[in-house]
Amino acid sequence: MSEVKVEYRLLGSTGERVSAIGLGAWQFSDAWGVLEYQRAKEIIDEALRLGINLIDTAIVYGRGMSEKFVGQALQELRAREQVFIATKIPGEMLAEHDVYKAVEMSLRRLQTDHIDLMQVHWPPSWNNIPTCEYMRALERLVILGKIDYIGVSNFGPALLEEAQACLGREEIVSNQVRYNIVDREAEKEIIPYALANGMSILAWSPLAKGAVTGKYSLDNLPKFEDVRANDPLFLPENFSQLTPLLEKLREIAERRQKTMSQVALNWLLASYDNVIPIPGAKKREHVTDNAGAMGWRLSFEEWRELEALSRKIVVYRSLLIQ
């Protein structure tokens, strides 16, 4: 493998330079199984060693465990000032009083006096909290110096417009959505809106939960107890459609002396200059592999071949209910 050459991208209109590949921290939870702090610290240490300076976590990841691991590791590694911390507040905690309390508790878990990017994890769909209530609470926290920037996650353009209209002086700088070479729904409305309004896209699940890494095949799909087993992509009827795309990813990876993961992540970087993938990592070597997606580019012909094969894939979520 060649030496990693880290790229940096501007986060929205903030002027902040963050690594083009970040580190997602959902894996520090019971959902993904990284429950030992020392292992989490090693993963974070490797990210820092490689020049990755964006770490994305959330209040709900491990019910605060992820934030605690990130905060403790950054303190022990004396690296808080070199890292841009993004975290997220869930939809059910968006009443004004909960916003203030949730941020106070996140600050404590993260062992910091400010959060670089606080994101609304998902809209309060079943809590009936007015959009302006939580957006103005977040803006107040910017004024108070507790958070630096406001972002959202899983918001469509209409709700983004409403949320931005609630703010007096701040701007929504990012939208975190699922986006990968298989699931490209974000290209229909969300990414064009972000481009037109100077927002960054933080791409969660940029490796389709491992579906495009070469780890899985029709003969080796996730077992029932794996969190991936409930993802419709891993149903045989859906996964079988990936075969031509996986073969092309493997072919390009071998020719370029890269891994399939690196090719899939590079495809995202090449597609839009405002997209910042945030893959997770359960081992130190996963971080190294993900970082290797930076510092080079697919040719247009390679990008186009992958684009054409990807576009043929249709994931039927309705198949989850037989």
Image (cartoon, grey):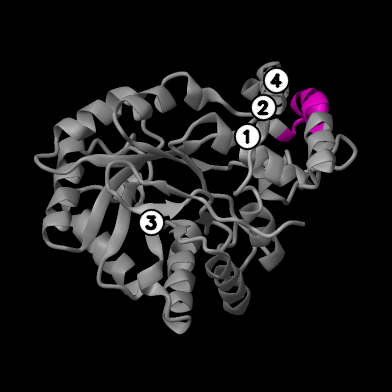
Mark 3 element type = strand
Circle 4: residue type: Ile
Q: Is residue 193 above or below residue 63?
A: above
Q: Nearer the viewer, residue 92 or 194?
A: 194
Tell me which numbered mark, 3 or 4, is placed earlier along the sequence. 3
Residue of label 3: 87
Mark 1 → mark 2, Cα distance in angstroms: 6 Å
Q: Nearer the viewer, residue 104 or 84?
A: 84
- The stretch of residues the image draws in magenta is 234-246
Query: Considering the image in quadrants, where does the N terminus appear?
Result: bottom right
Q: Is residue 73 above or below residue 291?
A: below
Circle 3: residue type: Thr
Residue of label 1: 267
Is residue 278 left or right of 167 when viewed as pictured? right
Q: Residue 174, position in %: x, y?
A: 35, 41
Q: Is residue 277 above or below residue 33?
A: above
Q: Residue 59, position in %: x, y?
A: 40, 59
Q: Residue 117, position in %: x, y?
A: 32, 54
Tell me which numbered mark, 1 or 3, is placed earlier along the sequence. 3
Residue of label 4: 313
Query: Considering the image in quadrants, where does the C terminus appear?
Result: top right
Q: Select label 3 or label 2 by which is in front.
A: 2
